[in-house]
Image: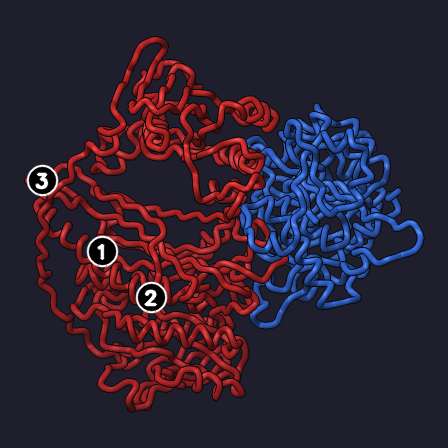
Amino acid sequence: MAAGGNASGIPTVNGSLYFDERYLGKPLVYCGTGGIMPSSLPDGRKTHEKRVMSGDRIFMVGGRIGKDGIHGATFSSEGLSETSPVSAVQLGDPYTQKKMLDFLLEARDAGLYNFTQDCGAGGISSSIGEMAESSGGCTVHLDRAPLKYPGLDPWEIFVSESQERMTLAVPPGKAGEFVSLAHLRDVEVSDLGEFDASGFLRVLYGARVVAFISMQFLHKGVPQLQLDAELRTPKLSEPAIAEHQNLGGILLSLLARPNICSKEHIIRQYDHEVQGSSVVKPLCGVKADGPSDAGVIAPLLGRPEGLVVSNGICARYSDIDAYQMAANAVDEAVRNYVSAGGSLDRLALLDNFCWGDPIASPDNPDGRHRLAQLVSACQGLYDACLAYGAPLISGKDSMKNDYRHGKWRISVPPTLLISAVGKTDDVSLSQTTDFKSAGDAIYVLGLTRAELGASEYYAMNNATGTAVPKVDFRRNAALYKKLEIAIRRGVLSSCHDCSEGGLAVALAECCIGGRLGAAVAFPQGKYIGKLTPAQLLFSESSGRFVVSVKRKSEKALRAIMRGAACERVGEVKGDLLSISVRGQEAVSVPVEGLSSAWKRTMGW
Amino acid sequence: MVKRARFPKKGKKAQIGKAKKKAKKPAKKMKMKKKIAVRSAKKIHSKSKARHVKKKAHARNANGVKMKAKGKSVVAKAVKIPIPQKEQRKPRCIVLAGFGLNAEAELAHAFCLAGAEAEIVHFSDISSGREKLSDYEIFAIPGGWSFGDDIAGGRVLSNKLKHTFRAQFEAFVASGKPMLGVCNGFQVLVKLGALPNISGSFAQESTLTFNKSGRFEDRWVYLKPQKSACKYFEGVPFINCPVRHGEGQFVPRDRKMLDALARAGMVPIKYCDEKLDDSAGYPQNPNGSAENIAGICDKTGKILGLMPHPECSIARTLFPRFTAGVSYEKNSMRFFENIVKAAKEHVK
């Protein structure tokens, strides 16, 4: 990802790394990209409307076709084994893509094409096939496609997923200008045929017809699958873990866990500054090594408007309840987004599913349960999107993430990655997670419940439990709107969401970022109720933040937060994080100790 | 405004919109390239753009905003003030683009803010003769991954330049006009032999090679200006900006050359720590460069190359700790203003 993003000149501003042993068979990599499109072209055409006209030339642009990436998509939808073909993996070349990108933007503004589609799964077979629906048919000459080396059969040319290619519909009158611009910019383009209104996809290799399919069948001919789902309730129970008096040691172990520890080693290998627009970067704080909740960029150089980008992922929750896994993934993404300065009014989400095979067969006895988990997750996603008023504007799924070796099978846990993106009117109002100055008051926003199910704390004790965090959408949405106002009015000095590891980890991370200690106390009272110290400090209840405010802004914060849970828990102070619960000291660790535990795991 | 030189479009004259100065250009030249019409600021506002069109919008607005906020800023000076006599036009800056370069927009933006008129020009527009270096007073090569940096950083682009518009390039060097190479641009200038060019024969004398850490790194650094022939750092106490490269370790041919560089005042900028100690080691010196050298210049001080990206620290909100009130954008802007100032004497 570093090679692709860096050489393409695209800043990698946000990301996360999530570990579970079940990804050993098929590690998952998600990558999301966003761009900005003019609403209309210099010639007045609206860019959101695109149509292929009958008579348009079919142009393939960019890289050449090779055997790499043949069956790439079907490969990623099959169980991985020692017989999986090496050629299924595409060989990327970001330089070719960057040249193509620059050229396409220039050709776009010159009005040289009507339609563009990338060659993803299925290569030109799918890009041309889909584009031909717009005009009503096409004729493709595969022998005109440029190859990396000779020896490809026509079907291989048609389905290869070799990278860095796009398919364009170029009006015949513009083809000459299009080709000469491409030559000038050293980008390879080839005219593969013509879009027409014949009603057929006609594919030729020389004079030989190698495919002739009606557009009707191609697009509407596939029968819908009817599948059965059956939700099985997992047999789980709350573990009995002895209450520790001193939770400081546990906090240090949590900070060192792969899902929580610093990812600085990786982050620094991604260019997160190119394009000169990164406002909130992946790392923050006095030593630029504290974690950020979200990325904020101001892509219109010199202008205050920007975009907030964040993500949420909590696959392990699906071991208890796939509905709450999805709901929490959305909540985490939204929480991160709001924490850095995003607004719910301008929020859009993306959903990316990766599942183990959900189709039952003798080979796959728990297929029906997996399918039911998929249904549950979709319901959780649906409810969350409605509650936060956020549309799902893009997404993807991959359903066969299983690895087989003899009797062994490793399947990924049901995994849903949610990305959040939205516009902010003024990036200078963004907030970061690091404590800023001693004397600031620390507040916890949102309620902590006894929700240790599938938490990092339980995972550290080799337990799953039952009490998975349940998202209270209405309460959270109300809190997020209030927090948005507090950030917009500049009331806060810092803001950090609580997720993996709970309150204690969030407090520790704020301390690490600012290299400042904190004196925090939870006296017996309404906020902690009957919670045990471990439940209070390590529960991963949704909808919570740790914020710090200047003394003089406390009144303003309380006023804004009226009606929401907003508990003053201590102040930024010294170089020691101390947390007491019901008057008893639970944690007392120097900030340098927190930071070295947090950075050691991946401090290569 | 930042403009991007355009591919010629048949039968369509270049539209320069409101940029009146351009009207003085011969019509023949105008046919050579189609430029994006400069829209009114209002219209641009409603049209958020993909990269290159967008750039133009920023620059214009940034100028506008800055003028309103600080009537006496240097940017404001460069914007039209009615003068009865013949008005001197802004220095023109050509920012190279294409073939994998990718930081042209922010570099052009910085030069615009500093009072130049920056134009982003594709390499092939110069090599094919559509654009001439001599029409410009500043030549800037931005960062990026030219030709994927597949052989070595900047190697292929420097070779391509040698075999296409070398004569123009050498004439630009001889003219004494300012030239800046940032990151990949610095690598290109070093591999071209334009830096440090002690011999004067454009032979490569030093190199920028893989970081000592062995990997690409993105981190913010402090830079301390040194006594040198380069005047671009005058009045700049230090610069705080990001580095992001995998091949930034400056290696001179030998110790003798290192001493010669120092004696001739060709080391204008070094990595340092927060207290401006320029002997600090990793990570303050992020790549293991000899003597913490972050950038070098030629004998005249007019050609400067550096690995860090001052164009990425020209606004308050780009600083990692701006939320804590820490930012040094004025220092970086001063650097660009000094380059533009040096270019002014070449404006005819």
The picture places residue B263, in percent across and down from the top left corner, at 84, 47
Are there few (<14), some (14-19), or many (20+) residues within 10 Å of tag 2? Answer: many
| SS for callout 3 | loop
Mark 3 and mark 1 lie on one chain; the one further toward the N terminus is 3
Residue A225 located left or right of residue B314? left
Q: In this figure, which residue is indicated by the disc labeled 1?
A: A378
Front in this rendered view, residue A518 or B287: A518
**What is the chain letter for disc 1?**
A
Kind of residue at disc 1: Cys
Q: Which residue is mark 2?
A: A388
Residue B277 shown left or right of residue A46 in the figure: right
Q: Quadrant of residue B330?
A: bottom right
Colour used to depict chain A in the structure image: red
- The numbered mark, 3 or 2, whose residue comes first in the sequence reads 3
Left or right for A217, reference B291:
left
- Labelled disc at residue A363: 3
Disc 2 on helix, strand or loop?
helix
What is the tally of numbered marks visible in this picture?
3
Q: Is residue B161 left or right of residue A548?
A: right
